């Protein structure tokens, strides 16, 4: 078992290293003294989005966007419909190629050269709005399947989980607040619990950066509070970027807020600073 894990680890690192090696950084060149596959956060930044523009039929969905996320930070992104929030997520995750600009994971990994699978493999997890869980399977089985679907794992669907994998499932069950529901079919969970389960599934592959699109849509107030706590707990050891409409929720998260408008950053700061910003009042908060 140990041997198999070693092999898996080797293959994982080997594959990641492959991208990093090709990931030429125009600012720094190839020469980095890093271990294989490591994202270089020596400048304290996990994500660089610089001068990024994306056009759809001549319409600029992103217009010279600049965004920097610190390693371990929890950042909220708000902005009116059509501001470019989802397009920004698409660019970071390799779904949409920018027409211009640079997108780097740490100092060394050029995300604009990768497809969605490769971006996931270097350690960026994305949670879409609609939860994609397996309704007929138990909570435990959903987390188990998340391990087995992880492209980096060389594990057959029928293989038994290792001790460390079982332990990881227990840890994640605690973190997402579902230890008592482990044997429950996922379809029987509340809407909020389903969202947490999906976050748990993303956590199984231990992403360094988690992108979450509108996590609290349709949640009860209690579930919103629990989600704010969960996202705060996830930050620190990893970075979390949350796109959200709900102002009360963003306020309760108490992190740095970035306001997007017409594909660029309009303002950045605490929720109070942002809400008192005249430009923001004008275009977004309407007061
Ligand atoms: P947000 O998530 O902030 O609501 P989006 O990133 O979804 O904004 O969209 C930004 C703008 O780009 C919108 O005007 C939208 O209509 C447009 N847009 C997004 N994706 C496409 C696409 N694939 N083709 C054409 N226009 C698009
Ligand atoms: Mg959107």
Image (cartoon, rainbow, N blue to C red):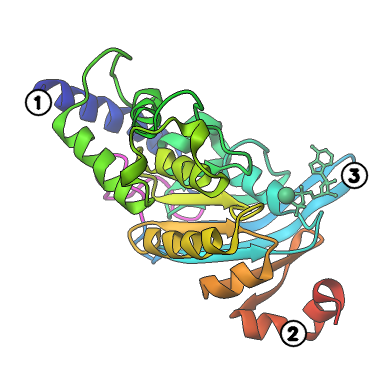
Q: Which residue is mark 1?
A: 2
Q: Earlier in the sequence, mark 2 or mark 1?
A: 1
- Quadrant of the image occupied by residue 3: top left
Q: Position of residue 147 (x, y in %)?
A: 34, 29
Q: Which residue is mark 3?
A: 58
Residue 72 image label: none
- Of residues 172 and 240, the one nearer the viewer is 172
- Residue ID at (33%, 28%): 144
The Cα–Cα distance between marks 1 and 3, rounded to whole angstroms, is 54 Å
Q: In the image, is the residue at mark 2 within 8 Å of ligand 1 by its beta carbon?
A: no
Q: Main secondary structure of the magenta part?
A: loop
For the C terminus, the image quarter is bottom right
Few, some or many residues within 10 Å of mark 3 (<14, 14–19, 20+): few
Q: In the image, is the residue at mark 1 within 8 Å of ligand 2 by its beta carbon?
A: no
Q: Nearer the viewer, mark 1 or mark 3?
A: 1
- Of residues 219 and 5, the one nearer the viewer is 219
The Cα–Cα distance between marks 2 and 1, rounded to whole angstroms, is 56 Å
25 sits to left or right of 205 = right
- Residue ID at (53%, 65%): 75
- Of residues 84 and 105, the one nearer the viewer is 84
Instruction: Kindly state the secondary structure of the residue where label 3 is placed.
Output: loop
- Residue ID at (47%, 50%): 210
The boundaries of the magenta stretch are 27-40
Instruction: Kindly state the secondary structure of the residue where label 2 is placed.
Output: loop
Few, some or many residues within 10 Å of mark 2 (<14, 14–19, 20+): some
Q: Earlier in the sequence, mark 3 or mark 2?
A: 3
The residue positioned farthest toward the left in the image shown: 2
């Amino acid at each position: 078992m140990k041997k198999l894990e070693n092999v898996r680890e080797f293959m994982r690192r080997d594959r990641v290293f492959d991208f990093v090696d090709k990931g030429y950084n125009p600012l720094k060149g190839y020469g980095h003294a890093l271990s294989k596959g490591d994202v270089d956060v020596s400048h304290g930044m996990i994500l660089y989005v610089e001068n990024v523009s994306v056009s759809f039929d001549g319409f600029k969905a992103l217009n010279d966007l600049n965004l920097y996320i610190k390693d371990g930070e929890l950042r909220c992104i708000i902005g009116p419909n059509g501001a470019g929030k989802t397009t920004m997520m698409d660019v970071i995750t390799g779904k949409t190629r920018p027409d211009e600009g640079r997108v780097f994971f740490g100092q060394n990994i050029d995300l604009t050269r990768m497809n969605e699978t490769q971006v996931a493999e270097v350690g960026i997890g994305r949670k879409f709005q609609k939860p994609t869980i397996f309704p007929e399977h138990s909570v435990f089985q959903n987390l188990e399947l998340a391990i087995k679907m992880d492209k980096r794992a060389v594990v057959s669907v029928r293989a038994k989980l290792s001790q460390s994998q079982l332990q990881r499932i227990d840890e994640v069950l605690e973190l997402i607040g579902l230890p008592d529901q482990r044997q429950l079919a996922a379809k029987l969970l509340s809407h909020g619990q389903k969202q947490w389960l999906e976050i748990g599934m993303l956590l199984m592959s231990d992403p360094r950066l988690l992108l979450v699109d509108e996590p609290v849509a349709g949640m009860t107030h209690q579930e919103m509070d629990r989600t704010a706590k969960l996202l705060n707990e996830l930050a620190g050891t990893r970075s979390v970027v949350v796109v959200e409409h709900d102002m009360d929720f963003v306020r309760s998260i108490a992190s740095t807020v970035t306001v997007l408008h017409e594909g660029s950053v309009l303002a950045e700061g605490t929720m109070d600073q942002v809400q008192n910003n005249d430009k923001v009042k004008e275009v977004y908060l309407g007061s």
